[in-house]
Image (cartoon, rainbow, N blue to C red):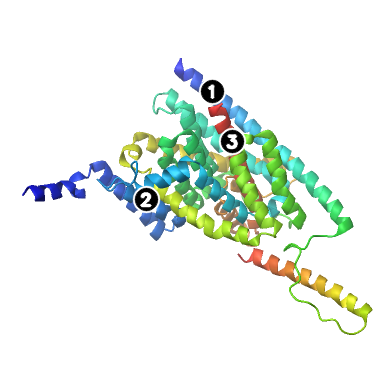
Amino acid sequence: MEAPSLLNEGLTLMLFGMGFVFVFLTLLVFATKMMSLLITQYEKSVGVLPEGGVPSPTAVIPRHGPIAPLEHTHQEDKNLVSVLTAAVHEYRSRHK
Amino acid sequence: MDKLLHLWHNTGLHQMTPGQGVMILIGMLLLYLAINKNFEPLLLVPIGFGGVLANIPGAGLAEYGGILHIFYTVGIESGAFPLIIFMGVGAMTDFGPLLANPKTLFLGAAAQLGIFATLMGAILLSTFGIFDFSLSDAAAIAIIGGADGPTSIYVASKLAPDLLGAIAVASYSYMALVPLIQPPIMRALTTEAERKIKMVQQRHVSQREKVIFPLLLLLLVAFLLPDAAPLLGMFCFGNLMKECAVVDRLSNTTQNSLINTVTIFLGLAVGSKLSADKFLDFTTLGILLLGMVAFSIGTASGVLMAKLLNKFGGGGINPLIGSAGVSAVPMAARVSNKLGLEADPHNFLLMHAMGPNVAGVIGSAVAAGIMINYVNG
């Protein structure tokens, strides 16, 4: 009676296994969709994370001239840096 | 004269058994395939060389205390090497295409049918008395259908250490043979018009999604299938290191130097399992055969699932990407791309096929977890 029980076990494992793989990945599909939806909503209000992570400052920007326009340039530089970092990251990840 | 005789008794020529001779030739064949034919050289060079070393008569490199045996005990018996490789693979994986089109996860699930169908095949063969596989042997052999080297080795080391050599060789050779095995099956199951289906440009996936996805996957594994946690846990860890972008140094090490180092020892350790008494066996033939069947069924079911999704899921999916659901990253995706270009020179499927491709990695790791859970439980 060894063989039939082995056959039985195999059949159970096959049905159980295939079923579980599908259940698991279906759940993952839903979870992923939910996550993407939530994050897209969230990012509408806070903006996207720069692709290469948040860049740390690499140089001190010299201060001269009046205060107000300087703050402005500083902000612009920061944006420029994050845009450039994103572009470089994108380029590198495409040309691996 | 006595001394001369003693020396003669110690030479390899005197001690060599025919089996060892054949195994050394097989090792050389693997080296030839790797070096001249470029078949997965990164693995077949260490495996082939390890195979030759393991069969040097009298040296006992693969026996207790031998260096290859030590590599094996430390890395494979403990399950460490395949897991470290999986971490590296995670660090090299980009989930972007999968996140852009989560539906492709179903393709990765469908392709695992190859694994479970082969399990049944192996069991049927032993029911008819052709081979003598136990349930755990059958499970370990079936995982070859996942076309994922580290997963196969991990499962084999847990469930059927005796068959490890043959399973590892089969699974890596078939990965190398993906460009030969898959296309005829894919052509047979799709029509010219289906192969020409163009897929829409993928949406942009934000960095936040990519950071959160491995954590989401990890939580799901933790809740549902802790047996898959070693494999998928390391995979998610590697991927998180890559995507979070704050530990680039760790991520670079994982995907380059660490994975290379481990690959060398993994290859040698697998080679040590190519000793004549274990490998030159009728069952090896069965394993090679079943592995091939597993692979073909996986490919076919992936393609058929893609056609099904196309019918009921709103269309827009080229069935060619279904075959990428067997893991074999990135080879299987390249095959899909090549066949797509063949049908229509402007049809680029590579990025679309990467989705099911990484889904296949997740799918086979889940299948591996189930096998281990069921057989050990």
Q: Could you tell me which chain the residue with mark 1 belongs to?
A: A
Disc 3 secondary structure class = helix
Query: Which class describes the residues within 10 Å of circle 3: few (<14), some (14-19), or many (20+)?
Result: many
- Residue toward you, B364 or B336: B364
- Residue toward you, A48 or A96: A48
For the point 57% across and 48% down, the residue is: B86
The amino acid type, in three-letter code, at marker 1 is: Glu
Of tags 2 and 1, the one toward the viewer is 2
x, y percentage for residue B203? 76, 56
x, y percentage for residue B103? 72, 45
Residue designated by label 3: B369
Asked where in the image residue B367 lies, by quadrant, the reply is top right
Which numbered circle lies on residue B76? Answer: none
Disc 2 secondary structure class = helix
Q: Earlier in the sequence, mark 3 or mark 2?
A: 2
Of tags 1 and 3, the one toward the viewer is 3
Q: Are marks 1 and 3 on the same chain?
A: no
The amino acid type, in three-letter code, at marker 3 is: Gly
Query: Which class describes the residues within 10 Å of circle 2: few (<14), some (14-19), or many (20+)?
Result: many
x, y percentage for residue B45? 40, 55
For the point 44% across and 41% down, the residue is: B167
Disc 1 secondary structure class = helix
Residue designated by label 1: A9
- Location of residue A82 with respect to B81 vertically, above or below: below
Q: Are marks 2 and 1 on the same chain?
A: no
Residue designated by label 2: B50
- Residue B313 in view in this figure: no
Q: Would you say the residues marked 1 and 3 are in contact, meaning their CB atoms lie under 8 Å apart?
A: no
x, y percentage for residue A58? 73, 73
For the point 77% across and 72% down, the residue is: A81
